[in-house]
Image (tube, rainbow, N blue to C red):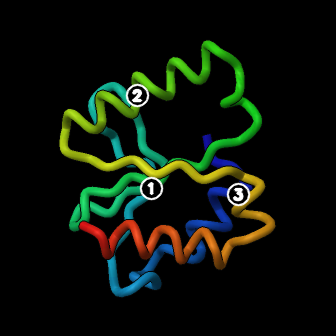
């Protein structure tokens, strides 16, 4: 599902706008679909909203992350709130995660 926060982050990631790195959107990964991915750095960025707070949802996210990690991906989660209130900080965090690979 596409959210306004995902659209906001995509506007900053698309077109190699972050350090010249190519990000894709809605990448199929096994039984899951990642919000954003940089294949070159094997980084997935997930934008989490309020629907990620219950025990069931937390367990689902953990299982999803575990699966993706077995496939060689690193998974970074950012909150909708951070995307809205601190997009520059989110971009810096993504850049740091890419640089650390």
Q: Are marks 1 and 2 in contact (CB under 8 Å)?
A: no
Q: Residue at x 37, y 57 (%)?
A: 37
Question: Judging from the image, what secondary structure is the residue with disc 1 in?
Answer: strand
Question: Judging from the image, what secondary structure is the residue with disc 2 in?
Answer: helix
Dot 3 or dot 2, earlier in sequence: 3
Q: Nearer the viewer, mark 1 or mark 2?
A: 2
Q: Is residue 39 left or right of residue 34?
A: left
Q: Nearer the viewer, mark 3 or mark 2?
A: 2
Circle 3 residue:
5
Q: Residues within 10 Å of mark 1 (few under 14, many from 20)?
A: many
Dot 1 or dot 3, earlier in sequence: 3
Tell me the distance, in whole angstroms, between the alpha carbons under discs 1 and 3.
Answer: 12 Å
At which x and y percent is residue 76? 46, 51
Q: Are marks 3 and 2 in contact (CB under 8 Å)?
A: no
In which quadrant will I find the N terminus?
A: top right
Q: Is residue 7 above or below residue 54?
A: below
Circle 2 residue:
64
Q: Residue at x 72, y 30 (%)?
A: 51
């Amino acid at each position: 599902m596409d959210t306004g926060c995902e659209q906001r982050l995509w506007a900053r990631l698309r077109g190699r706008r972050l350090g010249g790195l190519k990000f894709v959107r809605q990448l199929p990964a096994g039984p899951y679909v990642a919000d954003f991915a940089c294949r070159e750095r094997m980084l997935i960025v997930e934008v989490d909203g309020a629907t990620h707070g219950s025990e069931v949802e937390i367990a689902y996210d953990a299982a999803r992350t575990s699966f993706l990690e077995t496939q060689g991906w690193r998974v970074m989660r950012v909150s909708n709130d951070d995307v809205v209130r601190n997009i520059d900080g989110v971009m810096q965090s993504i850049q740091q995660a890419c640089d650390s690979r």
